[in-house]
Image: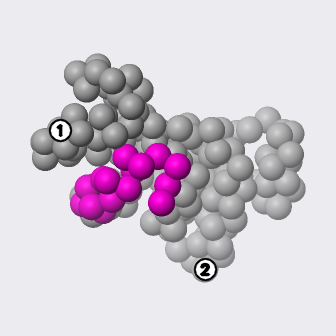
């Protein structure tokens, strides 16, 4: 069971949104494997859960910087195999050295910052869609109640 019991209540809704969101992920710069990693590093929170009218489902993406080197590694593997570019789109020239610098918080960012921003935007879009589904299914108020 998760630290946030309300998360366990919406598992079915998350699965439904995951299915619906697959096409959106396919149009993004991320592969499905990268998207899975991004979602693993993302935690969802409800702001102002005491008031379902004002409450908002938001994605906490503070752990994304920790996985950015892994996203680049996945992208490099896909490119080495002759596949389409993913997260970096071939824009990174330093490879392993850039990944190490990024993991240590060194270097100028570049593709890593762009990837992080793109991941944050996509996750925010996912959170909006999930909240919309919960509202449409009449589950938003009870989800907020469980979160408060």
Tell me whether circle 2 and circle 1 mark residues in contact (CB < 8 Å): no
Q: Nearer the viewer, residue 82 or 87?
A: 87
Q: Quadrant of residue 51?
A: top left
**Badge 1: few (under 14), some or many (20 or more) residues near its Cα, within 10 Å?**
some
**Which residue is the site of mark 1?**
135
**Which residue is the site of mark 2?**
81
**Badge 2: few (under 14), some or many (20 or more) residues near its Cα, within 10 Å?**
few
Q: Is residue 34 left or right of residue 16?
A: right
Q: Say if 25 sits above or below 61 in the image.
A: below
- Residue 141 locus on image (x, y percent): 22, 34
Label 2: state its secondary structure. Answer: loop
Residue 146 magenta-highlighted:
no
Foreground mark, 2 or 1, reads 1
Q: Is residue 116 left or right of residue 12?
A: right
Q: Nearer the viewer, residue 72 or 42?
A: 42
Range drawn in magenta: 1-18
Q: Quadrant of residue 72?
A: bottom right
Q: Residue at coordinates 18% horizontally, 38% vertically from top-left?
A: 135
């Amino acid at each position: 069971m998760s630290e946030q019991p309300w998360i366990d209540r919406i598992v079915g809704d998350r699965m439904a949104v995951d299915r619906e969101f697959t096409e959106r992920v396919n149009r993004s710069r991320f592969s499905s494997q990268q998207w899975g990693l991004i979602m693993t590093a993302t935690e969802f929170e409800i702001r102002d859960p005491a008031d379902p009218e004002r409450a908002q489902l938001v994605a906490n993406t503070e752990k994304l910087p920790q996985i950015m080197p892994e996203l680049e590694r996945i992208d490099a593997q896909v490119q080495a195999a002759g596949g389409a570019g993913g997260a970096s789109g071939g824009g990174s020239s330093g490879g392993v050295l850039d990944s190490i610098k990024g993991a240590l918080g060194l270097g100028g960012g570049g593709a890593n910052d762009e990837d992080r921003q793109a991941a944050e935007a996509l996750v925010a879009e996912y959170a909006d869609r999930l909240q919309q589904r919960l509202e449409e299914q009449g589950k938003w108020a009870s989800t907020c109640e469980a979160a408060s």
